[in-house]
Image (tube, rainbow, N blue to C red):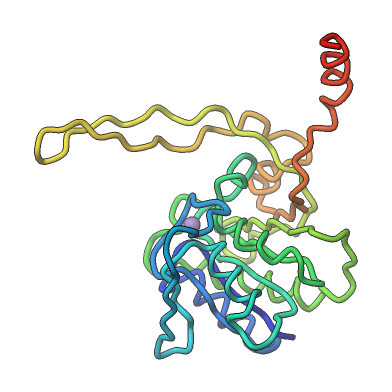
Amino acid sequence: MRILISNDDGVLAPGLRALVEALAPLGEVTVVAPERECSGYSSALTLQQPLRVLKLDNGFYSVSGTPADCVHLALNGFLDFEPDVVVSGINAGANLGDDVIYSGTVAAAMEGRFLGKPALAVSLCGPHVREHGAPGFAVAAQWVAKLLMQGTQLVLPARTVLNINVPDVPEAQIRGIRMTRCGHRARAMDLRQMQDPRGRTVYWIGMAGEPADGGEGTDFQAIAENFVSVTPLTTDMTAYAASTAVVTWLEGMA
Ligand code: MN
């Protein structure tokens, strides 16, 4: 199995390294990842400037672009082979509910949607995942390895990506693994307004909102109950529930 690994926390991120270590025994691993952190970049592609690729001493490819750029490059001519599967992560932080539309981790997996096997986006959920040496990454990476080994038995519709969130708790406290749906978050926290050293006003975007729908069957609920959460995602964002109302509204204009 040829496994392409990318992320949005950057090529030096500990979550990426944990993933490489856990998946290397399963096949041939290639890493193509952004040279710096690109969390929140979603599926942005760099179209106004070229991309530069550096091969690091450890064999990882470091790209002067976004997570989507990395996987796009890898699947469209940069590599001289086609990977069987794309795995993105392991992100330092949750990608639950509305997070998926901003997530560079999910986007890197999405960019692998044309391959035969479902791409995986993997995130570690907990307040301490950015602390040095967080052991949760290794635990989460083992879950990914288990899923990939199981992968041959999974048949999914085309263009399906699996968004996986793993709770950052000791391995023995993980209660199992669940299929989930995306929950929803409430509105983000307020902006933080500050002064730069030259006295000008600047703004930091606030924290993501609290879960507004963290109810039955959601990814939020699974994580809160210490389950690994697996949400199938697709690019079709059509709001089918709205179609009747929109048709009726358009008829009124005729
Ligand atoms: Mn990230």
Quadrant in which the C terminus appears: top right
Q: Please report the residue visible at 11 percent of the width from the left and 41 percent of the height from the top.
A: 197
Residue 101 image position (x, y, % from top left): 61, 44
Q: Position of residue 217 (x, y in %)?
A: 78, 41
- Residue 97 position by quadrant: top right
Residue drawn 61% across the image and 57% down it: 107
Figure label count = 0
Name the spot of residue 27 as percent of width and height, x first.
Answer: 69, 88
Q: Is residue 207 left or right of residue 181?
A: left
State the residue in front, 104 or 220: 104
Up the image or down, 196 lies above or below 105; here it is above
> Residue 139: x and y, percent?
59, 70
Is 246 placed left or right of 25 in the picture?
right
Q: Quadrant of residue 53?
A: bottom left
Rendered residue at 74%/50% (across/down): 235
Q: Quadrant of the N terminus?
A: bottom right
The quarter of the displayed image where residue 246 is located: top right
**Measuring 79% from the left and 59% from the top, which residue is drawn there?**
159
Examine the rendered structure and indicate whether residue 92 appears above or below residue 253: below
42 vs 15: above or below: above
Residue farthest along the top direction in this orientation: 252
In this view, the residue farthest toward the left is 198
**Residue most extreme to the front:** 254
